[in-house]
Amino acid sequence: MTSSTTSTSVSNVRFRAALSCLAYGSVSIAMTLANKGVAVIFNSPWGLIFTQNLVQTVVLTLASLGGAFNVTITTKKVRTMLPLNVLFVGMLFTSMRSLRHLPVPMVTVFKNVGNCLIVSGDWYFYGNDISVGVVVALLLIVVGALAASGASDLVFDLEGYSWMAANLLCTASYNLYVRRARSESQLTPTGMSYVNGMLSLPVITAFAFMTVGWDGINFITNPGVVFQANLYQQLLLLLSGGIGCLLGVCVFWCIAETSSSTLAFVGALNKLPLTILGATFFEATITTKGWMYILLNLTGGLVYALAKTGKLGPAWTLSVCPKREKISDDGDPMMMMGNQSSGSSGSAVVSASRPYDPEKGTN
């Protein structure tokens, strides 16, 4: 391969990686803002999640029938994708439980600390490198969350911390399993979103009934609750379902183009524009601690992006963990291409054991 061809391949992979992160971040923010206006329709969050996933499934079914994409559902693909739904519902349930016992700032701190689990899992299962730059980025984001929480929020509640620990395990497992599910199912991001949305409906219904009882599934026993909402809320509910459809595709696209660690960092950085938008449109106030959190998170995200692409120099790409044999042959494409373009070897970055296929995992 000539140097010009290699340079073009590197540029294309990095462009797709950046575009997938931007798409995921933007759609995720839109989803959060839309949810603020429709959550009041239902007696429990399960109703909102079920309705949004139902809209997602209907939209993607129509798109599939119209020839926008093709997907063949097999027993193997169902077995592969089903754990994602269980983990996703587990994430939601444990998050709600932890918020009953812990203040929101402390939950934010723990969620940022949870990124350490995802980065470690990326190293253990997929052989992705943990460099000095990645560690510095993690520290900046965690310190920013701690600074924003304040000493008054550092309360001890054993039950709250137990639920939070369960939430971190579910979140890390979900982020890490997505890559394996993509590899084993051989589905495109759109196909994964379609199968995931379809399988989620019975899982959400069963979990809502087991945890809340009949009141938790009022969206099935009393579907008229949706039509009792005003027209604005009904339209916003449909819009949120459409956004949820895009969000599912963007999550799997981002995973296909980058890694679980990058997805986690983008999710952490999403809180920054949400904070600013909240101050702009919902008259929320950003305190000095809040601005400190924003600054440290922005710095951490910038350090992570530059360290991943090798722009900070060789010192920042040095490994802090021993090189590990990959359990799953699905590493970080951005890191692989960065390694090929720089021509480095050894522990500085993880070398690709096979050429990266630019066509794999795209829509």
Image (cartoon, rainbow, N blue to C red):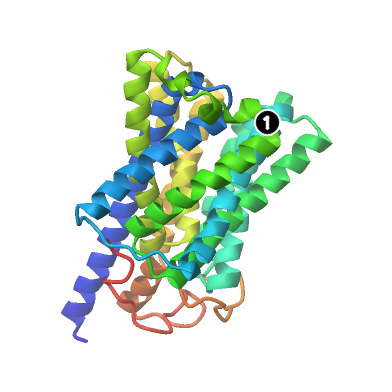
Residue 49 in the image, given as x and y percentages of width and height: 49, 35
Q: Residue at x 35, y 71 (%)?
A: 338
In this view of the protein, which residue sits in the foreground, 178 or 348?
178
Q: Residue at x 39, y 80 (%)?
A: 344
Q: Is residue 209 left or right of residue 26?
A: right
Q: Is residue 1 above or below residue 298?
A: below
Residue extending farthest to the left is 4
Return the x and y of residue 30 as percentages of the image width and height: 36, 33
- Compared with 39, 90 (above or below) is below
Asked whether, in this view, residue 231 is left or right of residue 53, the answer is left
Mark 1 crowdedness (10 Å alpha carbons): few <14, some 14-19, many ≥20: few
Measured as percent of width and height from the top left, residue 33 is found at 40, 27
Taking the spot 49% from the left edge, 52% from the top edge, the residue there is 199
Count up the numbered dots. 1
Residue furthest to the front in view is 221
Q: Quadrant of the N terminus?
A: bottom left
Whether residue 359 is visible to the viewer of this picture, yes or no, is yes
Considering only vertical position in the picture, is 341 above or below 150?
below
Kind of residue at disc 1: Val
Q: Is residue 142 visible?
A: no
Helix or strand or loop: what does disc 1 sit on?
A: helix
Please name the residue that numbered disc 1 is placed on: 212
